[in-house]
Image (cartoon, helix red, strand yellow):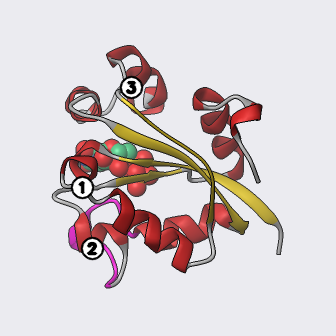
Amino acid sequence: MAVERTFSIIKPDATRRNLTGKINARFEENGLRIVAQKRLWMSRQQAEQFYGVHKARPFFNDLCTFMTSGPVVVQVLEGENAVAKNREIMGATNPANAAAGTIRKDFAESIEANSVHGSDSPENAATEIAYFFAGTEIVG
Ligand code: UDP
């Protein structure tokens, strides 16, 4: 298995409820190392660009409003098969369908306010990491 990096966001619904530490514990307990992390408030432009792939979807506008409704924590997680492992730890997009013990099952408020983002492929992880972090900010 290859050591890999993935991009993660702790979303505004989770920072608002002070869940950053509890969510980070899920990553660490499951063998992912937080090798970069910062808290920021995304601009509308950043949110629209980040979720650009969903531009034509009916939820796009509300999603961008939600993602700019409060601070987020952007992160780089490192570990064996980090992309797939993080998707497993996160659970399904809709918390109603998420498996027991996943972040979204335990913390998400709705299909939109679902507490975390995680890259869905190594290629997207590389693009998303570069969107938010300079190489010097990532310390493995
Ligand atoms: N989303 C939404 N309504 C939907 C589907 C998705 O509000 O019907 C939001 C949700 O916050 C989700 C994000 O859009 O996390 C990106 O959707 P995607 O299908 O990429 O899900 P993810 O990869 O985050 O599980």
Which residue is located at x 35 percent, y 68 percent?
Answer: 22
- Residue designated by label 2: 105
Q: Quadrant of residue 47?
A: top left
Q: Identify the mark at residue 91; answer none if there is no mark.
A: none
- Foreground mark, 2 or 1, reads 1
- Foreground mark, 3 or 1, reads 1
Q: Nearer the viewer, residue 77 or 45?
A: 77
- Which mark is first along the chain, 1 or 2? 1
Magenta span contains residue 42: no
Please state the horizontal and vertical placement of residue 106, each as a whole percent of the image.
Answer: 25, 74
- Which mark is first along the chain, 1 or 3? 1
Seen in the picture, residue 74 relative to 55 is either above or below; the reply is below
Region of the chain picked out in magenta, as a range: 91-100
Q: Identify the mark at residue 47; answer none if there is no mark.
A: 3
Please state the horizontal and vertical placement of residue 103, each as a whole percent of the image.
Answer: 35, 70
Seen in the picture, residue 97 relative to 77 is either above or below; the reply is below
Q: Amino acid at mark 3?
A: Ala
Q: Nearer the viewer, residue 67 or 33?
A: 33
- Residue designated by label 1: 18
Q: Nearer the viewer, residue 58 or 66?
A: 66
Which residue is located at x 71 percent, y 44 percent?
Answer: 123
Please state the horizontal and vertical placement of residue 17, each as a whole percent of the image.
Answer: 18, 55
Magenta span contains residue 99: yes
